């Protein structure tokens, strides 16, 4: 636990510095670089905060001081009376007494160990709250949702994006804007309102592009990193920027091959649903 928490602290300080630098440069990088580049940079920061890359580099060898033995062997030569008889060598084991005083060590709790357990407790609480809140949210929203078994627009968009996996659609009055949920069992929730086929196509393009790029996995990974570094205030800003860059890069990915009119329709659809 001691070494694990030490590694987390090192990675957290590193992530703090990189996040602060990227936030300062964001007004410049947002204009100079595409949204996808910013998204990947934030993901790289997330990875650097859980993978101790510095341990892969070989460390300098440290010469260790030999330990003093607790008992030594002393050779003592015992002379004999005979001139031609060689002296016998008598080996006597003589213990070497340690100069250290025999002090009884009393058990005590180290501050660093206490901080380690506090970090572990905080991480567990964070994960439990996030997962429980997500499950409760999905259960509540699913109660009022109606499953849609067949949708021609949805199937056409799946073919366009070359997605073969079965993805369910549910319609609910509780959702004001579309949402993709579920990593293992993906479901697209759409609001229960009148939406034209063209606008519905734009909605499905956005949500299924999220699925194709595995953005839900990235968002859950960001939450895990936030849980590990819950004591680091910039980690929360890092996760917020990951979510923002994810949405912007998804929009850019959807509209890159569209005509100007289709781009206007797409952006109007997304903005209307967001409002």
Image: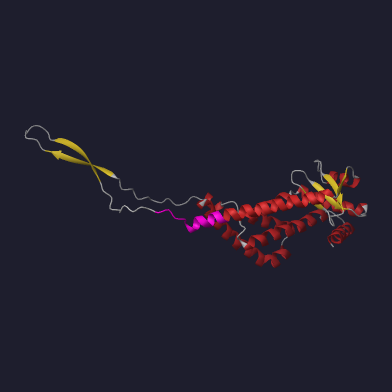
Image height of 26 relative to 40, above or below = below
Image height of 180 relative to 34, above or below = above
Side (left or right) of 22 relative to 63:
right
- Which of 45/149 is in front? 149
Image quadrant where residue 38 sits: bottom right
Q: Determine if residue 47 is in view.
A: no
Residue 20, horizontal then vertical, whole percent: 63, 65
Residue 208, horizontal then vertical, whole percent: 81, 49
Side (left or right) of 151 relative to 223:
right
- Which of 164/50 is in front? 50
The residue drawn where x is 67% and y is 57% is 42
Residue 150, horizontal then vertical, whole percent: 89, 43
The residue drawn where x is 70% and y is 64% is 29
- Which of 259/204 is in front? 204
Q: Main secondary structure of the magenta part?
A: helix
* Magenta part of the chain: 106-118
Does residue 83 belong to the magenta stretch? no
Image quadrant where residue 93 sits: top left
């Amino acid at each position: 636990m001691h070494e694990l928490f030490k590694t987390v602290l090192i990675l957290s300080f590193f992530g703090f510095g990189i996040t602060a630098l990227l936030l300062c440069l964001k007004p410049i990088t947002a204009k100079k670089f595409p949204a996808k580049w910013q998204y990947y940079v934030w993901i790289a920061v997330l990875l650097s905060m859980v993978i101790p890359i510095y341990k892969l580099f070989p460390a300098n060898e440290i010469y260790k001081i030999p330990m003093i033995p607790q008992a030594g062997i002393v050779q003592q030569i015992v002379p004999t009376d005979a001139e031609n008889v060689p002296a016998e060598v008598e080996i006597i084991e003589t213990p070497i007494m340690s100069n250290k005083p025999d002090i009884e060590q009393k058990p005590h709790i180290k501050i660093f160990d206490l901080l380690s357990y506090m970090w572990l407790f905080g991480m567990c609480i964070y994960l439990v709250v996030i997962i429980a809140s997500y499950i409760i949210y999905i259960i509540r929203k699913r109660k009022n949702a109606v499953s849609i078994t067949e949708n021609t627009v949805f199937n056409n968009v799946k073919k366009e994006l070359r997605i073969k996996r079965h993805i369910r659609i549910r319609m609910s009055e509780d959702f004001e804007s579309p949402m993709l949920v579920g990593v293992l069992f993906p479901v697209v929730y759409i609001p229960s309102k009148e939406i034209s086929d063209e606008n519905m196509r734009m909605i499905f393009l956005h949500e299924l592009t999220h699925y194709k790029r595995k953005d839900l996995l990235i968002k859950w990974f960001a939450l895990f990193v936030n849980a590990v570094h819950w004591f680091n205030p910039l980690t929360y800003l890092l996760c917020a920027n990951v979510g923002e860059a994810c949405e912007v890069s998804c929009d850019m990915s959807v509209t890159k091959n569209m005509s100007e009119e289709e781009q206007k329709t797409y952006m109007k659809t997304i903005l209307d649903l967001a409002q």
